[in-house]
Image: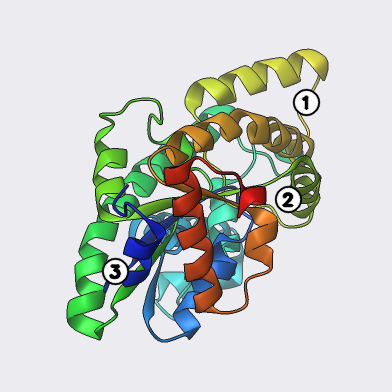
Amino acid sequence: MIHHSGQAWRDAPEKRVMLLGMSGLGKTHIASMLRRSGDWFHYSVDYRIGTRYMGELIADDFKRHAMQVPLLRELLMTDSVRIESNITFHNLAPLSTYLGKPGDPSRGGLDFADYMTRQNQHRAAEIAAMEDSARFIDRARALYGYPHFVCDTSGSICEVVDPDDPDDPLLARLSALMLPVWIRGTEAHTAELVHRFDAAPKPMYYQPQFLHDAWRDYGRDHPGPVDPDAFVRWTYARALAHRQPRYAAMARRGVTVEADEVAALTHPADFEALIARAIDRKTTGSTPEDT
């Protein structure tokens, strides 16, 4: 780790953290709280993906649909209207909509090959956005004067690195710059995440083999045209179990905090104290109950 003790973390003039975990466990809650303090730069990987790297793809897909409406087609062809997404840190719907769902086209589904193409686009965008974090650390300090930096990662970061490889190039670079902080949930959190995903699906990237296996297994158990909504709900629940050991492996390079601990945070000082305790727990071998 880049901090050998909780006190070293507290004394660091420039604190840099990389928040890990499934969407909905508190990454953006922490990052937004830190940003509001005025001392932390909030770098949202999902926002960077949806603007810098996939913004044009998203806008073009909107235009493709708009071109099917005669009035909008005429306006677009004469440059009379502009169509673009309005992604924010808290609204990633344009990116989710573009990634889509595989299944029956009559129910809004994509051909599986087209869905995989968009998944591959997301993978490339996520890797590029994570690599950009190094430049934004420097930019935040030099341009805006922020001493501290929080990287609000995508929930799928564990899918674009090899957590078990100590020499994984991307993970090695990131953990040398920032302290990885895994927000770990319980089985109760898992049920709540599935419920939230049903109501408001988030952008999701899955490893190709995982998706091919899921598509095969779902099709075997549900013959006939695939219901896109049912498939992504089923796949998301399956992904939670798939990702847990991958996050745990990533956390070996940093610290682990519990989702309930994160939910109780109300001030940056609380967060700094939580991370100091987590570092000391790791370095002394104690448990959360001991501290």
Q: Residue furthest top?
A: 220
* Dots 3, 2 in contact, CB < 8 A: no
Tell me the SS state at disc 1: loop
Quadrant of residue 52 within the rendered picture: bottom left
Q: Residues within 10 Å of mark 3 (few under 14, many from 20)?
A: few
Above or below 5: residue 12: below
**What residue do we see at 80% from left, 45% from top?**
188
Above or below 172: residue 162: above
Tell me the SS state at disc 2: helix
Q: Does the rendering let one see residue 81? A: no
Residue type at mark 2: give it.
Answer: Phe
Closest to the observer: 5 or 89? Answer: 5
**What residue do we see at 33% from left, 45% from top?**
127
**What residue do we see at 40% from left, 76% from top?**
78
Task: Estimate the spatial distance between the alpha carbons at disc 3 and disc 2, rounded to whole Å.
Answer: 37 Å
Q: Which mark is residue 201?
A: none
Residue hosting label 3: 12
Provide residue 66's location: percent of width, then percent of height: 56, 63
Q: How is the image coloured?
A: rainbow
Provide residue 205's location: percent of width, then percent of height: 52, 40
Quadrant of residue 14 within the rendered picture: bottom left
Task: Estimate the spatial distance between the alpha carbons at disc 3 and disc 1, rounded to whole Å.
Answer: 56 Å
Q: Which of labels 3 and 2 is toward the front?
A: 3
Residue hosting label 1: 225
Residue hosting label 2: 197
